[in-house]
Image (cartoon, rainbow, N blue to C red):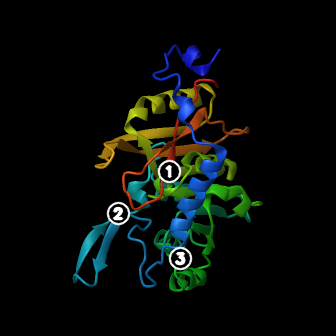
């Protein structure tokens, strides 16, 4: 019996899998996506606009302060706790001689990591901070190095290869996953490097508007399989003016408290991006044959 049959749901389009791209096409899409951002020249004097905390910052060119959104506000809460509260909690419950291992995927210029490395934070000297980005300026790299923040330039589709011997307690990704060619491969990679008892808080996952119902099916499968991972439909949609397709921006949370691999009951279906200047991506639909 298939999962669809077990859930008592009739498939909307039984022949949809026929339009799935070949493995070769998937690899080309992934390579194009990473190449675009690897070759994107960053401003050497520019931090990304998103920091770690939601706070008021002084903008020198304007001569006044403004509220600056941070991961604290933008990333989904887990059990009602922000990522700031989660990091404090993990730092306060460390075993002797241990440190909280944190990874920021798609960290851009590293502003959030720079703020996390502040010596006045309650988790100071209790964390190991790492960031993964497709490109970063030498200036930003030097500043972060002075704070003992390790930055790796690499492709998020290869997380296990990039971190072969490291498991993380807290994995964050803000406004990055939607730019990656194979989002679910990245999600699988995140699960693979998340330590037992670890937490991941992620946003900006792009799903086709017509897949909104499938998100519910996937979440139900995760719940039935007792996997603590959820896609959160934020119900914020944006329409592609060229193709008419509408996309939803979803969030995901993961809590890894039990052993076993993560299985996604989905198959890839190629779609275009809502913004033409970026490479194409893959979205995923419910696999009716699992």
Q: Badges 2 and 3: C-beta atoms under 8 Å apart? A: no
Viewer-proximal residue among 73 and 33: 33
Q: Is residue 21 above or below residue 72?
A: above
Looking at marks 3 and 1 on the same chain, the residue that comes earlier in the sequence is marked by 3
Residue at image point 44% right, 47% down: 206
Write down the quadrant of residue 91 in the picture.
bottom right
* Distance Cα–Cα, label 2 vs label 1: 27 Å
> Dot 1 lies on which element?
strand
How far across and how far down the image is residue 35, in percent?
A: 56, 66
Looking at marks 2 and 1 on the same chain, the residue that comes earlier in the sequence is marked by 2
Q: Disc 2 vs disc 1: which is toward the camera?
A: 1
Picture quarter with the N terminus: top right
- According to the picture, the residue beneath numbered tag 2 turns out to be 69
- According to the picture, the residue beneath numbered tag 1 turns out to be 281
Residue at image point 58% right, 29% down: 287
How far across and how far down the image is residue 107, in percent?
A: 51, 67
> Dot 2 lies on which element?
loop
- Residue 220 visible here: yes
Q: Residues within 10 Å of mark 1 (few under 14, many from 20)?
A: many
- According to the picture, the residue beneath numbered tag 3 turns out to be 136
Looking at marks 2 and 3 on the same chain, the residue that comes earlier in the sequence is marked by 2
How far across and how far down the image is residue 288, in percent?
A: 58, 24
Q: Disc 2 vs disc 3: which is toward the camera?
A: 3
């Amino acid at each position: 019996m298939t999962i669809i049959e077990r859930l008592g749901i009739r498939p909307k389009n039984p022949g949809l899998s026929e339009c799935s791209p070949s493995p070769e096409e998937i690899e080309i899409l992934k390579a194009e996506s990473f190449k675009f951002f690897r070759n994107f020249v960053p401003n050497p004097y520019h931090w990304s606009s998103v920091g770690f905390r939601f706070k008021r910052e002084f903008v020198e060119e304007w001569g006044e302060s403004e509220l600056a959104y941070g991961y604290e506000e933008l990333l989904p809460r887990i059990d009602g706790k922000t990522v700031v509260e989660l990091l404090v909690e993990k730092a306060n419950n460390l075993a002797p001689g241990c440190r909280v291992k944190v990874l920021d995927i798609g960290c851009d210029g590293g502003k959030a990591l720079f703020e996390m490395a502040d010596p006045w934070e309650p988790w100071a000297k209790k964390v190991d901070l790492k960031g993964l980005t497709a490109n970063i300026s030498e200036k930003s790299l030097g500043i972060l190095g002075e704070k003992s923040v390790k930055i790796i330039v690499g492709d998020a589709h290869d997380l296990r290869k990039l971190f072969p011997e490291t498991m993380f307690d807290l994995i964050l990704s803000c406004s990055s996953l939607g730019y990656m060619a194979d989002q679910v491969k990245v999600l699988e990679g995140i699960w693979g490097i998340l330590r037992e008892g670890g937490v991941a808080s992620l946003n900006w996952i792009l799903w086709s508007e017509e897949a909104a119902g499938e998100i519910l099916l996937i979440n139900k499968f995760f719940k039935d399989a007792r996997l603590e991972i959820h896609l959160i439909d934020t119900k914020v949609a944006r329409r592609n003016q060229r193709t008419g397709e509408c996309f939803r921006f979803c969030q995901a949370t993961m809590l890894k408290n039990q052993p076993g691999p993560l299985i996604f009951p989905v198959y890839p279906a190629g779609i275009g991006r809502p913004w033409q200047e970026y490479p194409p991506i893959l979205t995923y639909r419910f696999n009716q044959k699992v």
